[in-house]
Image (cartoon, grey):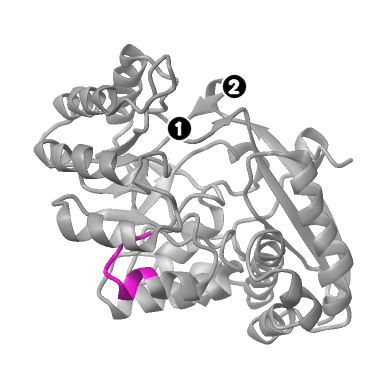
Amino acid sequence: MRITGVETFILHVEVSGGAIADGSHRVGHWGAPGVLIHTDAGLTGTGYTGTHAHLASDRMIALCIEEAYAPLLLGRDPREVRSLWTRLQRHPPLQWVGRSGITHLAHAAVDVALWDLKAQAAGEPLWRLLGGSGEQRLEAYDTDGGWLDRSDEQLLAETEARLEQGYRAVKIKVGSRDERGRLDPGRDLRRVALVRGLLPTGARLMVDANGAWDLATALEAGRALAEHAVAWLEEPIWYDDLPGHARLSAELATPIALGEQLYTLDAFRDFITAGAVHYVQADAVRLAGVTEWWRVAELAHAHHLPVVPHIGDMMQVHLHLALAHPACTLLEHIPWMRDCFEEPATVVDGRFEVPERPGAGTTLREDALERFDVAR
């Protein structure tokens, strides 16, 4: 089998309610710059990365795939995924201009498409190709509620709706600011207490600051979180602050979760060996695809740390990976991109259904490009 064509797309899909806000961002659409890799066997692999739907930067990702990676792929056997990963990752001109960021996101899309092809060629869903078991009922935790732009009443209504749908784990955002733009951890802690009071015994509550707090705020507010049995505090401070996260991990009773803003195996190695993280949130569309994600998951597993994939891919690839890797027992749920896929990740009674179609679950519906591709 040989690669005969490389075609890019840029999907922009509206988020729930038309807009959401966390501690660092306001987003109206989710972006998925991606690639269709065609072969002489009639199979097409689909891969993409996840963005905040900024068209200029999404075009740069697509251009990187078209102009930099496609020439390295044409004529190659797509099943030789790890060899192709090294070919793209170590290509000297690309290595010179970036080992993370745009080139890495573009590489992620390509690698996901190649694994999709490899699983299709084997006639297996990716989770089975990677050695997983279809008997696992992977637990979902909901993040499509608890945004900072929601009122207290909306927050509680959304949480109650998730409980009625069968969820027993939810995550809400912290990192609020007052009318003068100053951090307002008092509002955050009040909302945490409200949600905790609504959850039944045994239900898990996570909080996510999206890097909004400074170290002093994280230390003070983080100590108070222990009173509400918070399962983890996610991205409490600036993403690259390794010493700060190490201090928080050492001083707070609440575990630290992070990883969506770490782009490389080396970055995860540094945070893990420094004791700066307890829940490893590796993201295959921020790392350079499935290949690098698996290496991070193996590293975390060797340190006896759980891996809870970040949902930058809106569950499709990560569902397969979480079903396959023994470090994973929990997966985030945000359903913004459901209408894009032939076999969207689906939660029933708080657990994910096991996908059965060959591939990585990334095959687009026939109308997805017509409805959502802003590059056309």
Q: According to the image, label 1 marks what residue?
A: 22
Secondary element type, mark 2 = helix
Q: Is residue 271 left or right of residue 240?
A: left
Q: Is residue 295 left or right of residue 125?
A: left
User: Residue 53: horizontal and vertical position, in percent?
Assistant: 69, 39
Residue 211, relative to residue 296: is it above or below?
above
How many numbered marks are there?
Answer: 2
Q: Residue at x 72, y 77 (%)?
A: 95
Amino acid under disc 2: Gly
User: Residue 67: horizontal and vertical position, in percent?
Assistant: 89, 66
User: Residue 81: horizontal and vertical position, in percent?
Assistant: 67, 80
Out of 180 and 246, give the one closest to the viewer.
Answer: 180
Which quadrant of the view contains residue 269? bottom left
Q: Residue at x 51, y 37 (%)?
A: 335
For the question of whether residue 318 can be seen, the reply is: yes
Q: Is residue 133 left or right of residue 346?
A: left
Residue 302, relative to residue 318: is it above or below?
below
| Segment colored magenta | 271-280
Q: Residues within 10 Å of mark 2 (few under 14, many from 20)?
A: few
Out of 167 and 171, give the one closest to the viewer.
Answer: 171
Examine the structure image and report whether residue 176 is included in the region drawn in magenta.
no
User: In whole angstroms, how far apart are the C-alphas of marks 2 and 1?
Assistant: 14 Å
User: Residue 171: horizontal and vertical position, in percent?
Assistant: 33, 38
Amino acid under disc 1: Asp
Q: According to the image, label 2 marks what residue?
A: 18
Secondary element type, mark 1 = loop
Q: Residue at x 37, y 33 (%)?
A: 175
Which quadrant of the view contains residue 47? bottom right
